[in-house]
């Protein structure tokens, strides 16, 4: 299936990406624009422009208690937003930035509570995508950049995904398909022990090696972070997860009962005829890179259900496993 380039409002209009310079001008004037990162496309606004950040929340339909991540161009920007930067943060920044790692630190008093969801912590990262870095540099300011989609829905990994969400109302800088494909790993360094608040493609074991200690799991009292709700990253079509060995039989059963079935699986699964399907790579990086595009494509197929192959629960696959679990947790 190919992505349609039609405006979701029904009007026929092509996607017309804007340049980095044009996007920077929009942001510096208090506007909002979408930009690519290596993880997903973000809905950008100047982090210190409270009204612009509130526009991002309004466009997404994001609850005000749900914090956003500030994207920086240089590691020195940590001190502009964090009240204190522990040695662990500097070590992780030197090792993994720019890249798909977000650090949660105690915020400075002058950092808006709109960004932090009313908390005393702030989430920060330096993206690896060269266009994201160029845009932040052009603005001379940190940018908020939550995923450029309606709140709770599937994150965008191409400029066309953003266009399908918002039409011509949100300017988009075209950086091509995202390299990583799922959101960053989030580590909390605001307390006594480092905690893993959101898994991503960056392996937690590599982080622990740099820190010299094990990461604690998120628990009651941990800072709220993006993508931490039980149901998230979800298409409108219900998603149900099955082990590879049971998926084909379940698809056939539902087809026999008259359901319209879509199957999201690797080549290990035999997909029955009559199903819409998307074949994902078997290896972890390819699976993550194509996951959201696959969910969006199958969501547009007009089926009653998406049956998805369950991934391993081990540390290497934890970020992908997390996204699929949340996509399948939406109450319907």
Image: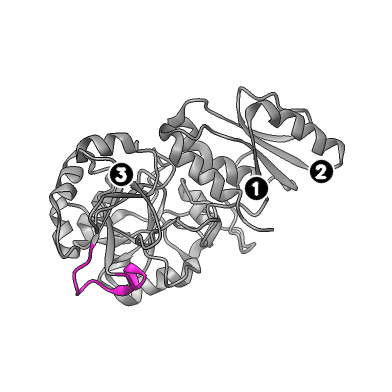
Picture coordinates of residue 25 (x, y %)? Answer: 28, 65
Question: Which residue is the site of mark 3?
Answer: 215
Q: Are marks 1 and 3 in contact (CB under 8 Å)?
A: no
Q: Residue at x 16, y 58 (%)?
A: 77
Q: Are marks 2 and 3 in contact (CB under 8 Å)?
A: no
Q: Main secondary structure of the magenta part?
A: loop
Q: Given the current orientation, which residue lies at the most extreme bottom position?
A: 51
Q: Is residue 117 magenta?
A: yes
Residue 125 vertical position relative to residue 260 in the rendered view, above or below: below
Q: Residue at x 16, y 43 (%)?
A: 91
Q: Residue at x 64, y 62 (%)?
A: 10
Mark 2, residues whose alpha carbon is within 10 Å: few (<14), some, or many (≥20)? some
Question: Which residue is the site of mark 2?
Answer: 259
Classify mark 1: helix, strand or loop.
Answer: helix
Residue 303 vertical position relative to residue 151 in the rendered view, above or below: above
User: Going by the image, does 173 lie left or right of 71?
Assistant: right
Q: Is residue 250 visible?
A: yes
Question: Which residue is the site of mark 1?
Answer: 299
């Amino acid at each position: 299936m190919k992505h349609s380039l039609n405006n979701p409002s029904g009007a026929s209009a092509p996607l017309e990406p804007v340049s980095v310079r044009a996007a920077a001008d929009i942001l510096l004037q208090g506007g909002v624009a979408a930009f690519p990162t290596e993880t997903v496309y973000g809905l950008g606004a100047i982090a210190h422009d409270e009204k612009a950040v509130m526009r991002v929340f309004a466009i997404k339909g994001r609850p005000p208690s749900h914090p956003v991540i500030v994207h920086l161009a240089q590691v020195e920007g940590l001190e502009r937003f964090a009240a204190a930067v522990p040695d662990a943060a500097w070590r992780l920044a030197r090792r993994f930035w720019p890249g798909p790692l977000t650090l949660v630190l105690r915020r400075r008093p002058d950092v808006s509570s709109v960004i932090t969801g009313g908390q005393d912590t702030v989430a920060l990262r330096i993206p690896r995508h060269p266009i994201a870095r160029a845009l932040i540099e052009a603005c001379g300011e940190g940018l908020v950049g939550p995923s450029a989609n309606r709140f709770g829905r599937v994150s965008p990994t191409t400029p066309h995904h953003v266009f399908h969400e918002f039409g011509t109302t949100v300017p988009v800088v075209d950086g091509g398909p995202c390299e990583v494909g799922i959101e960053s790993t989030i580590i909390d360094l605001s307390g006594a022990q480092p905690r893993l608040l959101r898994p991503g493609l960056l392996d937690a074991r590599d982080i622990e090696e740099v820190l010299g200690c094990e990461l604690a799991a998120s628990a009651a009292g941990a800072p709220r972070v993006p993508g931490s709700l039980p149901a998230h990253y979800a298409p409108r079509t219900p998603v149900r997860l099955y082990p590879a060995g049971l998926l084909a039989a379940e698809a056939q059963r539902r087809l026999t009962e008259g359901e319209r079935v879509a199957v999201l699986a690797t080549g290990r699964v035999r997909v029955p005829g009559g199903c819409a399907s998307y074949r994902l790579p078997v290896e972890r990086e390819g699976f993550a890179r194509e996951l959201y595009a696959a969910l969006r494509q199958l969501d547009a197929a007009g089926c009653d259900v998406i049956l998805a192959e369950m991934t391993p629960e081990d540390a290497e696959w934890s970020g992908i496993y997390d996204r699929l679990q949340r996509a399948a947790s939406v109450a319907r």
